[in-house]
Image (cartoon, rainbow, N blue to C red):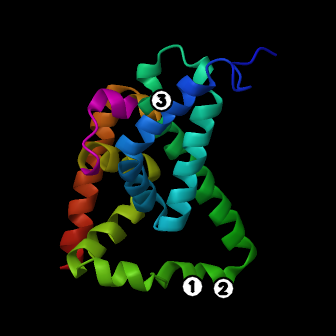
Amino acid sequence: MDTDTRGRPPGATDARLGVTELYQAHAVGLIKLGVIMLGDRTAAEDVVQDAFFGLYRNWGRLSDPENALAYARASVLNGCRAALRQRIRRERRDLSAVADAATAESVESIVLLSEEHRAVFAALRRLPDRQREALVLRFYLGVSEEETARAMGISRGTVKSSTSRALAALGRMLKEES
């Protein structure tokens, strides 16, 4: 295998710099996405870390480094989906964990979020995955419809309909609670 003067494979520095810049610019937003999807900051940070590690490993395979952010967003969404599936399997094995997980909130979350915010986040977590993902990407992170579609692997029209349905459902849930 070829190496540079420091013994690294060719392109390793480019990957490190590219991933570092992307991480510095977008990690906080991606962690927010993960927190909303998973309801757990530590798990969200793990998912984002895994996404950036995967991006680093596959940097040389990117046909266009401009697509790196879309790749990272899609990786975070996929990681959240996998974490949720894993959580569901674990909860099915331990039925008592289901009751605990449904009512448990971290002390930090309780202190940081107002009652209104908690109600919105609780309602968001009750939405179907696709609707929740579309809302979070579009309105919480401010991602365009086109970028949301790419990150979720769906059409732009599906993003629009999922977002519309999610907003209507969220409105109904919040109205019922008040």
Amino acid type of the residue that numbered disc 2 sits on in the rendered structure = Ser
Q: Is residue 105 above or below residue 11?
A: below
How busy is the neighbourhood of tag 1: few (under 14 within 10 Å), some, or many (20 plus)? few
Q: Residue at x 33, y 44 (%)?
A: 137
How busy is the neighbourhood of tag 2: few (under 14 within 10 Å), some, or many (20 plus)? few
Q: Position of residue 1 (x, y in %)?
A: 82, 16
Q: Mark 2 highlights which residue? A: 96
Please, what secondary structure does the residue beneath circle 2 have?
helix
Left or right position of 80 against 172: right
Location of the C terminus (image quadrant): bottom left
In this rendering, does residue 154 appear at all?
Answer: no
Which of the marked residues, 3 or 1, is nearer the chain's N terminus? Answer: 3
Q: Residue at x 40, y 60 (%)?
A: 36
Distance from the alpha carbon under mark 3 to that under mark 1 = 41 Å
Left or right position of 37 against 50: left
Q: Mark 1 highlights which residue? A: 100
Amino acid type of the residue that numbered disc 3 sits on in the rendered structure = Gly
Chief secondary structure of the magenta portion = helix
Q: Is residue 141 above or below residue 111?
A: above
The span picked out in magenta is 140-149
Q: Mark 3 highlights which residue? A: 18
